[in-house]
Image (tube, rainbow, N blue to C red):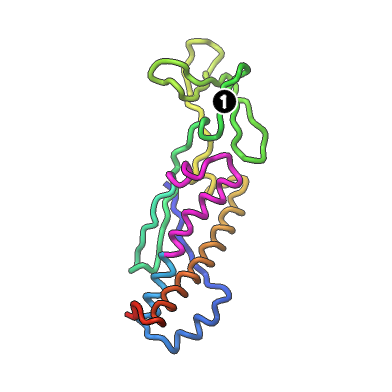
């Protein structure tokens, strides 16, 4: 399981840092926890949105592979866990046509033919994608899958750097928004400490 440690770097929030001298330290800590909670919840959606935009996976399948957030240090830190279990070729739009099994991994790419690939038609393996190891009809079978969400996001995938950068920008943006919500609630008289 891959980890996505939420690293919040506040950029352009000089006003919040100026408020630090005028606010109660407990209120500021509560606002930071609120911002982290808000950012962590938004990170799961951002990962699903960004991976789904570039890879041929559905958002529900991606969100199933993202668990968390799990908070530590009193809500000051959060971690999302990305599954390394690879989705089957069917999750990537795998189809069994007369010429073999075809699947499309990147959304912008062409459908790739899996040599000796097929979808089992009967038995306890019915509906699952496989490929034969050799050309013999009785050869061993290998399960056909695409890259996992953890590998796509955390590994050296084609769009990995872009995905991490856009999700990090979204986390920073949502952290500031969540922190501002807590401070606004306190200013209205709700949840001061």
Residue 14 rendering spot, x and y as whole percentages: 55, 81
Q: Residues within 10 Å of mark 1 (few under 14, many from 20)?
A: some
Residue 112, compared with residue 47, is above or below; it is above
Residue 85 rendering spot, x and y as whole percentages: 44, 39
Outermost residue to the front: 188
| Closer to us: 5 or 47 | 47
Q: Quadrant of the C terminus?
A: bottom left
Q: Name the dominant secondary structure of the magenta segment.
A: helix
Tell me if 104 is positioned left or right of 4 in this view: right
Magenta part of the chain: 38-64
Residue 109, compared with residue 73, is above or below; it is above
Query: What's the residue at 50%, 45% (across, down)?
Result: 59
Q: Which residue is mark 1?
A: 95
Residue 81 rendering spot, x and y as whole percentages: 42, 51
| Closer to us: 85 or 170 | 170
Residue 174, compared with residue 57, is above or below; it is below
Tell me if 146 is positioned left or right of 68 in this view: right
Count of numbered labels shown in the rendering:
1
Q: Please tell me whether residue 58 belongs to the stretch shown in magenta.
A: yes
Tell me if 36 is positioned left or right of 116 in this view: left
Identify the secondary structure beneath mark 1: strand
- Residue 110: image quadrant is top right
Residue 67 rendering spot, x and y as whole percentages: 40, 50
């Amino acid at each position: 399981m891959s980890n996505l440690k939420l690293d919040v770097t506040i950029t352009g929030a000089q006003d919040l840092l100026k408020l630090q001298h005028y606010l109660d330290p407990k209120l500021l800590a509560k606002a930071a926890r609120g911002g982290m909670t808000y950012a962590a919840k938004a990170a799961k959606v951002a990962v699903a949105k960004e991976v789904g935009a570039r890879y041929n996976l559905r958002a529900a399948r991606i969100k199933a592979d993202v668990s968390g957030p799990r908070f530590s240090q009193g809500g000051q830190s959060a971690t999302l866990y990305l599954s390394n279990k690879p989705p089957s070729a069917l999750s990537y739009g795998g189809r069994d046509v007369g010429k073999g099994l075809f699947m499309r991994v990147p959304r912008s790419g062409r459908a790739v033919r899996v040599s000796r690939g097929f979808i089992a038609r009967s038995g306890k393996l019915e509906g699952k994608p496989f490929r034969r190891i050799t050309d013999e009809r009785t050869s061993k079978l290998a399960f056909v899958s695409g890259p996992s969400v953890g590998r796509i996001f955390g590994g050296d995938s084609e769009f990995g750097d872009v995905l991490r950068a856009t999700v990090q920008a979204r986390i920073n943006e949502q952290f500031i928004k969540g922190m501002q919500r807590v401070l606004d609630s306190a200013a209205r008289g709700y949840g001061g400490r």
